[in-house]
Image (cartoon, rainbow, N blue to C red):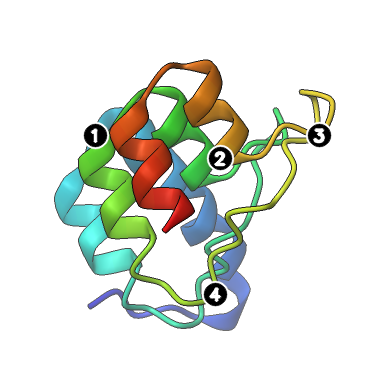
Amino acid sequence: MIFVDSHDVGDIARQLIDAVLGGNHSYVRRAIVCPEIDINTMDTRGMSSLSWAVSFGRYDLVKMLLRRKDIDVNQRVARRLGVTPLISAVKCGSVPIFRYVYD
């Protein structure tokens, strides 16, 4: 479990994005059970942890992130003209991720 001070919540959410980028499964697993963390936080490129996981084809991390009921699969990536994680899965040609996100 990750214990979060209310002032650190944004930093922890950004660390979640870094963990997804680095493939740090143990951090992602711990972070997704922490309700204080905004799972939909975007980084400076306007991408969320789910957007990055889909973009890199990380099916394992996508499955973990989708365990959070408050994750927004329709969140538009700020700098990609409204692309959502679902659209990214299609563009990347990742049928398993598309099916998992769509269901």
**Disc 2 and disc 1 in contact, CB within 8 angstroms:** no
Spot occupied by residue 69 in the image (x, y as percentages of width and height)? 47, 77
Q: Where is residue 87, by image quadrant?
A: top right
- Up the image or down, 74 lies above or below 71; here it is above
- The residue under label 1 is 23
Q: Secondary structure at mark 3?
A: loop
Badge 1 crowding class, 10 Å Cα cut-off, few under 14, some 14 to 19, many 20 or more, is some
Q: Secondary structure at mark 4?
A: loop
Q: Where is residue 86, by image quadrant?
A: top right
- The residue under label 2 is 86
Spot occupied by residue 76 in the image (x, y as percentages of width and height)? 75, 43
- Mark 4 and mark 2 lie on one chain; the one further toward the N terminus is 4
Kind of residue sitting beneath label 4 = Asp
Q: Which residue corresponds to the image point at 58% horizontal and 81% vertical from the top-left?
A: 6
Q: Nearer the viewer, mark 2 or mark 1?
A: 2
Kind of residue sitting beneath label 1 = Gly
Spot occupied by residue 81 in the image (x, y as percentages of width and height)? 84, 25
- The residue under label 3 is 82
- Up the image or down, 11 lies above or below 18; here it is below
Q: CA distance from mark 1 to mark 3?
A: 25 Å
Kind of residue sitting beneath label 2 = Leu
- Mark 1 and mark 3 lie on one chain; the one further toward the N terminus is 1
- Mark 3 and mark 4 lie on one chain; the one further toward the N terminus is 4
Q: CA distance from mark 1 to mark 4?
A: 22 Å
- The residue under label 4 is 70
Q: Quadrant of the C terminus?
A: bottom left
- Mark 2 and mark 1 lie on one chain; the one further toward the N terminus is 1
**Disc 3 and disc 4 in contact, CB within 8 angstroms:** no
Q: CA distance from mark 3 to mark 4?
A: 20 Å
Badge 4 crowding class, 10 Å Cα cut-off, few under 14, some 14 to 19, many 20 or more, is few
